[in-house]
Amino acid sequence: MALGWQADAPRPAWRLSDEDVEAILKARHADPFAVLGPHASADGVVIRAFAPHAESVTALPEEGDAISLASRGGGFFEGLHKGSPAESKSPLRYRLRATNAGGSWDYTDPYALPPVLGEMDDYLLVEGTHRSLYERLGAHPMQLDGVAGVHFAVWAPNAARVSVVGDFNGWDGRLHQMRKRVDSGLWEIFAPEVAEGIAYKYEIISRDGRLLPLKADPVGFAGELRPSTASIVARTDNFVWTDAEFLAQRQTVEPWRQPMTIMEVHLGSWRRGEGGRFLTYDELAEQLIPYAVDLGFTHIELMPVSEHPLDASWGYQPIGLFAPTRRFGDPVAFARFVDKAHAAGLSIILDWVPAHFPTDVHGLALFDGMPLYEHADPRRGFHPDWNTAIYDFGRREVSAFLAANALFWLDRYHIDGLRVDAVASMLYLDYSRKPGEWAPNPDGSNDNRDAVAFLKRFNELVYETHPGTVTLAEESTSWPGVSAPTSAGGLGFGFKWNMGFMHDTLEYMELDPIHRRWHHDRLTFGLLYAFSENFVLPLSHDEVTHGKGSLLSKMSGDDWQSFASLRAYYGFMWGHPGKKLLFMGQEFAQRREWRENESLDWHLLDAPAHKGVQTLIRDLNRLNRELRALHARDRDPGGFAWIIGDDRDRSVFAFARFGEAGDPPVVAICNFTPEPRHAYRIGLPRAGSWREILNTDAAAYGGSGVGNYGSITAHAIPSHGQPASAEITLPPLATLYFTPQDQ
């Protein structure tokens, strides 16, 4: 029997109090799930619904008569489904039919459905060990009790109320008020009939009763195109990958012993479409991937692709950490990009930013009305250089959130490596702060122990759960053991950017050749520490923007000398121990500095000098890939030996690189003056014929063509500490590579 309560009848015991009704209408009830939906009573099952646009509401059970719910005003309705006590303890399955002057509509009551999260989710979040946080939080299309919809879950422990609002409920925070899990501060609700593609945010009431600006989902898997800021319901777990063989092979090699030449790319400015529009992920897959493969790069490193509101931040101030930016397409399109890269043999590294986040009101800042993701003390929670917030690395839930985000990209998008941005700013409490602006440790030290612990745990998790991937640190200080295992007291990164190499060598190349003799050690000093870490030698975006000019513009001399110096410098760098990274556009000697809102100047490739530099990079990458001496022992002091390191008067350098037993050595000789040098004697590891396998002054690269006609002969005449030597021609502003003729 189905009954609705009549206003003129005696008040039944199951009727809700006026105070509770008022709280629901104002969306201020502490526990809406305790009120709305079906609830057992002594008389049967009470059904309560909030439908503010309805004039009447009827509950339609799967079995039995319809239940006309009585209006309590303001869109609140309640009624009783009578039954035996046993029946009232069983779940009552029903749909609601709402009616107004415009018609009627049926829907499933979200408050009639059970929770999705469990006690283990609460426990793991609070403990800080929830590795698969992204499988539980965020917006997940699914079926619950046979009903299709989306499960929403968000962490907001200081909130008095959280609602999910979006296109599906008219952005009305009164409708989908969420269930709070008091043990963890998680909020959740299953929204029936909601599907992929819907825009949504969270409406949050703070602990002190303030209505906060609408918040994007911290674990949202997609977002709107800026300037819009809503999250988008999207799946990331159903892409059909074709890269199983690539991933399996990735696990069989040691990355330190493999060739690694990285092309750093900003997707928004590598190339633009007609009218200056962004290329899509699919267009980038069709154009960028073949380009990188043709030039012989082994990796593409993408500047941050996580959703971010400001183009001018280049992605380094992300808000949607789990969402590939909508600028270039949807999540599935980004997955296709990675899959096609793997099909072409290219690995993908992402720039990842756990150091800080922007304070935009729709983001993580003061997420539930109080410091939550950020440290509450501004001396540790605010970054003065970037006006951004700093994560509270010591809070277990926050460190779990960040660690899960890192694993998310490796898991859902098969990313091959994560380069962590601004590590130095994480390691030091006094980073970029004056005395009195930072809070030291109790013993007065300045190391950020919470951040150190987080970085170690992050690296341990990556290498444990995704063998074959790599982590890289942009770290500019002398912090010891950045790329040492955590078991040996290190931070656990696979590689560290060698910022000192970049700064010292570029400062040397900016000098007029006549002055370089006085700064000879700028090129030799790096070998004093070259094997203290697993280094990547970076020529990154930071060196070609903010008034620094392009790499070509840094080279001294006239145009011819600038091109020759750049080619010689690339030859020196590719011969030097360490993996290689080159920012896009520098492979063809872009003349102007990089701008994030413009395409690279592709027309320059019509000029032979620019085309020649590009050809050189292709050949350098090929040699690095083919000759183990140039990559297999990058971190081993036994893989390098100076031959000439003290000819400062002629600015000549020579060194040998060695691979494993049986691998042919490579000898590199650099002349950093515009004066060719004939009959220059150089010591060599063995007598016999040596092939000139690289000459950066070759005509094919835009050079003058001075060289050694393809080979030289070394005789058993000791020189420079070597058992043999040869007289060679050193072209002007050039680097030469030689390897034994018989190998």
Image: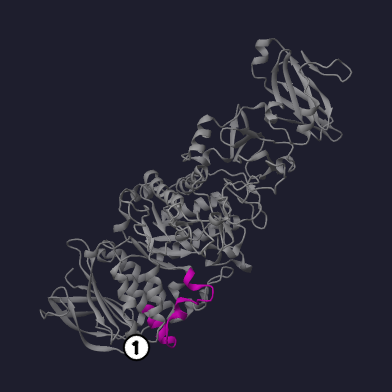
Residue 309, image quadrant: bottom right
Residue at the extreme right of the image, as rendered: 8
| Relative vertical location of residue 563 with respect to residue 254 in this rendering, above or below | below
Tell which of 14 and 481 is nearer to you. 481
Query: What percent of the width, then of the height, locates residue 32?
Result: 70, 30
Which residue is tagged 1?
674
Q: Residues within 10 Å of mark 1 (few under 14, many from 20)?
A: some
Q: Is residue 274 left or right of residue 613?
A: right
Q: Amino acid at mark 1?
A: Pro
**Residue placed at 34% from the left, 53% from the top?**
490
Residue 699, image quadrant: bottom left
Tell which of 535 and 551 is nearer to you. 535
Query: What percent of the width, then of the height, locates residue 618?
Result: 37, 70
Q: Is residue 165 left or right of residue 15?
A: left
Q: Is residue 66 visible?
A: no
Tell which of 212 and 412 is nearer to you. 212
Q: Quadrant of the C terminus?
A: bottom left
Query: What percent of the width, then of the height, locates residue 637?
Result: 24, 64
Q: Is residue 545 magenta?
A: yes
Q: Is residue 593 magenta?
A: no
**Residue placed at 26% from the left, 88% from the top?**
677
Query: What percent of the width, then of the height, locates residue 44?
Result: 72, 14
Q: Is residue 538 visible?
A: yes
* Residue bounds of the magenta highlight: 542-567
| Relative vertical location of residue 35 with respect to residue 424 in this rendering, above or below | above
